Amino acid sequence: MSPKMSEALSPIHGDQSTPATATKRMQETPHLTFHHPRAAGRPRPSGPPPMTLGFGDYRAPQASRGVFYSFLAGSGSGGETVQMRLPLVRVALATVISALIAMSLAFLPASPALADDPPSIEPAAGPSEDAAKTPPAEQDAEATDAAPADSPPVPTRVYLWVDRYEELGGFIVEEDHDLLTIRDVDGTIRSFPKNRLYRIIRLNDIQAARPGMVELRDGTLLSGQLVKDDFDEVEIRIEGVTTRLPRASVVQTRLDLTLEEKYQRFQEMIEPDQYTRRFELASWLFDEEAYQLARAELIEIVAKSKLPRAVQLLKLVEAQLLLETDSGASTSPSPLDGRTRPDDRSTGPVDLRDLLPQEIISTDDVNIVRVYEIDFRKPPRLHISPDTIREILERYGASPLIPADSGGRTALFRADSAEIVDLMFKLKARDLYSRIEVKSEPPALNLFRQRVHDAWLIPNCATSRCHGGLDGGRFFLHRRNAKSERVRYTNLLILERWNELEMPLVDYLDPGRSLLIQYGLPKNEARFPHPDVKGWSPVFSKGNPRLLRDAFGWMNSMYRPRSRYPVDYEAPLISTPDLPTPQSADSPDDRRGR
């Protein structure tokens, strides 16, 4: 112990005063404060001089009034000591409070030293002051420049399945991880916790028809051209037939990339010198019937690599482009022969192929022809959408052919497609025939394709020197792209509707009287022989009797009584142009010396 501490403690250790005397002495103590090292530099309070509280010894003398601790409270400014006698419980309480105060002070940040003259801070100029210094005209100009150039984006549309009983659509107002706020079609703002919603369906903004898929609530997937995706209905075009589906029957729509977008993505993944992969890309374009894109790709491959497979595929592509009825002449040179096909045909010789008829029926017309030739003894693959069944119930619900009870009507949605088509035929619902999707050829049309059209009609009657060109009279058959179903069914309509002669080309009631049969027989066997034409030869000879038998089989298999297909098409008539007669050498020259 230091000498100063011993000197300060000596009066206490030698004090023999009573507790009352010690208490009186404590009351005469002027002031007590705590002193902490981090309090250095802080301003001291005014008043009597404080006493510094330190740590010292304690003793517990025996007293007549109980046990007391003698606690060294501190020393005064003049070296005077103060002795405190407290009961045991109060001492313990004071010790705990002191420890807590010391711990709190230990965690206080040290205060920075106070400067004599702290620097003054200039207040920032507010917006009002800037506005006061700026003329109103300049303020308007600045506001105009600061305005965004683009209009705000269109809010995202959603369709919500709130629960099993409520569904609604609207525009997203605000969305975060947990909450979704929308404005419905009535303008009401509603908020939903995402984890309480059954399903959130985000609608597609479709500017123009593009490939996509519609998922129905019964699990059916429809693929086609998506036209509209709205709150109340979805519109999709399947093979030219537009179908409107109520939103109550649709789960969601999915957009597919267009052919050009897919091609661009594939092209970005292939280096220019990877000719094998580029050839595979061109083959894919050929399979997708994107002949112009395939030709452009193959021209570059052949020019730089001379890849044999690319040369062969390029020949096929150019041949296909020639067969396209609506394709124009290409103006780019071909690396195969170095020729250039001029775009301007106002001069030079006339291409006689341009004088041939070009119009053929559409894919929708092909489907409706198939509908009229359905044979329920051997039905083709059919598909009827649930939306079509609902429309049947709405339009023809009063008919006795429609079940009156809900159970019977519900059973129609589970019935086979052939049964629904048979019901439509009995109802004579011709306005809904276009909604029947015939996925395969009926037997009668299959016979026409295999045993008539491809077997002998095109090879014998539709050649360029016969009825496939300008030398076959007024009767014409399409031969370009003859494997296409559109061309094949167009030729079928020509056979049925061409009526330039007094007798029909195809007589389903009496197939033997058909001019198609009579003109194919040898002249000595036909009742109506084929006109005399150079190069003509009979189709139905004794050496191949099966052709004639198949022709009769096809006519007898077509649906009877016959009805005219609801297809807007007129059989073409060929009119051969009058070409100028070459001038003979003996004719007078009237050019008058020119």
Image (cartoon, rainbow, N blue to C red):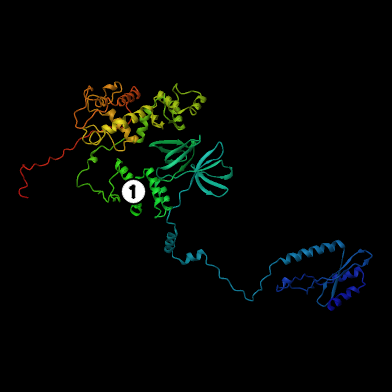
Residue wearing tag 1? 311
User: Tag count in the figure?
Assistant: 1
Query: Residue at 29% across / 47% down in the picture?
Result: 330
Q: Residue 255 appears at what percent x and percent y? A: 45, 44
Q: Is residue 131 left or right of residue 466?
A: right
**Residue 252 appears anywhere in the view:** yes
Asked whether 397 or 532 is in front, the reply is 532
Query: Against 318, is 129 above or below?
Result: below
Query: Against 393, is 130 above or below?
Result: below
Q: Residue 221 appears at what percent x and percent y? A: 47, 37
- Looking at the rendered structure, the kind of residue marked 1 is Val
Asked whether 219 or 430 is in front, the reply is 219
Quadrant occupied by the N terminus? bottom right
State which quadrant residue 287 falls in: top left
Q: Residues within 10 Å of mark 1 (few under 14, many from 20)?
A: some
Q: Residue 73 appears at what percent x and percent y? A: 83, 70
Asked whether 198 or 12 is in front, the reply is 198
Q: Residue furthest front?
A: 543
Asked whether 588 or 314 is in front, the reply is 314
State which quadrant residue 119 falls in: bottom right
Check disc 1 and report its element: helix, strand or loop.
Answer: helix
